[in-house]
Image (tube, grey):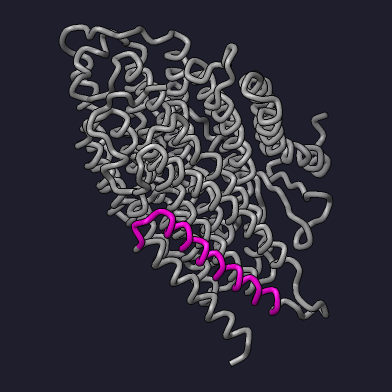
Amino acid sequence: MTSATLAGLVGAALVGLGLYGLIANPQPLRKILAFNVMGSGVFLVFGIVARKGAAAGLPSDPVPQAMVITGIVVAFAASALAVALVLRLFEETGRATLSPDAWTKPSGEGAEAE
Amino acid sequence: MTAPSAPLGAIAGGSLLPLAILLPALGALLSLLMGGRRAERIAFLLMPAELAVAAAVAVLVQRSGQPLVYDVAGYAPPLGIALRADGFSAVMLVTAALITPAAGLYARTNFATPGDVEKRAPLAFWTLLQGVQGALSLIFLGGDLFNLYVGLELLTFAAVPLVALDGRPETVAAALRYLLFALFGSVFYLLGSALLFGAYGTLDIALLASRIRAEPAVWLAAGLMTAGLLAKTALFPLHLWLPPAHANAPAAASAVLSGLVVKGSFFLVVRLWFDVLAPLPAVVPGAILAGLGSAAIIFGSALALRQERLKLLVAYSTVAQIGYLFLMFPLGHGPWAADAFAGGVMQALSHAFAKAAMFLSAGLIAESLGHDRIAGLGGAGRAMPVTFLALGLGGLSLMGLPPSGGFAAKWLLMKASIAAGQWVWAAVMAAGGLLAGGYLYRVLAPALSGEIAQLKKAPQRSREGVALALALLAVLLAFAPPSFFSFLQIGRPAASVAFR
């Protein structure tokens, strides 16, 4: 088994673990962490792609590396936004849960409140 | 001037493409810099310019009869990144440039520029509105799958906070749920692009389309990217986030979210299957997408029938109407392909206008009555006739009754599915139309009968006018001339029309 194959398998495993966590964990914070695990798996795959494209004599293909950096920035921004929402939810309700009772209201009272 | 100067025209027009992205981006940045007092003014200064740019792009595409291309920084793909505008991009650009200002005009009351005390909601609203506009332009024009990923993320980051603008816990929870679905979608999309880059060494759409072959890596990438985009488009069964998010957002935001934002990721599904993967045999994936779309039509409509609140009903009807968009996918190859494509695009346009009109009307109803319970709508139509006219005309398009853009869309899709011998989609469309009639009847019948309802405050004429204008645009789409449909075909790869 080459190192590239190993890295690919690890990347796939990370995506799988993260996906399971994202779906199965009820806690929003854990879901955000699971999303980051998934993201790491994807970045690892990009890393192997960069190695694979190194035929031109460069140590590695810079394009996927640039993509990984952009991807990391985007994932960081996404995590920050998600954490901000979780914090706000906790401030408002005293708990951070996504249970349906918290976000559906039977009546329309105040739906247009400013 | 009338001399055929296609190359020159293409170059001159090309520089308009970055402008369509940069103007709203500039607006968003300026709003942040200059604060909440000036944000509204900046938005209204730039929106006409954005509409003019979108219209100019459409005119140039129409004149040259081929897509406009702009190589960013002068580097052509595969080294650089290209922006491209074909017929589909141009009509979507114009649609976005019309609906965003309409939502803005409606929102002037809710998010008025603060007098003495700086408030956060107006600043956030006007900045995010321009963010949505800029992200959509990037998605409609992007010619590189990774660039499109960035556009998709920008769209999510602008759309999610719009849901939670008023900060009530249920809206924050709805926004968080939306964000988590969207993040799932973006990781899958990114993984798919990584696999495509690994296989072909480029993410430029035109280059990929010429290199792509039916092999396992491509199918895996296509599956991952499609699944990710479906989560963002809220196609059944990944629609769970949409109703609470769209129903709880302020009405102007709902109009943009339901009318435009879900169309952004839908646009990318079309790009993926009709451009990037056009050479592949796509019968089975197309049938799966249309099967999910059919389920969305039936479930979404049935759930809309059971809602107690008007805004939730309108939101569930979005779930159903998104389903129609996906009926074009199994019909992409054959003599009927042009009809199917035009039908899908027409559905995207007419739903955008009709649903924006309906959400704005629903917002006016909720503000005027103080609630939006369907059981309490008795006689409201007689008290605010213009608002209900806008709601009803939007509904006409949803049902697919003539004359409306919705009718044209469903007629084209039905014609294509019958020509292709795929009767099942036609049956689903007919059933969906009946169900839509049912849920609209639930709203309109009590509203138009009984004693005149007492309003807490009468709706403003100008805001009613905005909703009505959007609904009329949805109706006017029915009268699109044949040249409009040939315009939509500009830039389509030959594969989809090869069988003609």
Q: How many marks?
A: 0
B267 vs B420, nearest the viewer: B267
Which residue: 42% across, 28% down?
Answer: B250
Residue sitting at 49 percent across and 15 percent down? Answer: B109
In x, y percent, where is residue B344? 45, 45
Residue at point 37% right, 23% down? A112
The span shown in magenta is A25-51
Residue B380 lies in the magenta-colored region: no
Residue A71 lies in quadrant: bottom right
**Residue A50 placed where, x, y %?**
70, 74
Residue B294 relative to residue A22: left or right: left
Indicate the quadrant where residue B37 lies: top right
Farthest residue to the left: give it.
Answer: B450
Would you identify the image quadrant in which residue A46 lies?
bottom right
B155 vs B394, left or right, is right
On screen, residue A103 above or below B81: above
Residue B234: x, y in percent? 40, 48
Magenta stretch containing residue A32, yes or no? yes
Is B97 placed left or right of A15 in the picture?
Answer: right
Query: In percent of the image, x 54 and y 55: which residue is there?
Result: B497
Residue B139 visible in this rendered orientation of the protein:
yes
Above or below: residue B380 compared with residue B145: above
Where is residue B440? Give x, y as percent. Answer: 25, 28
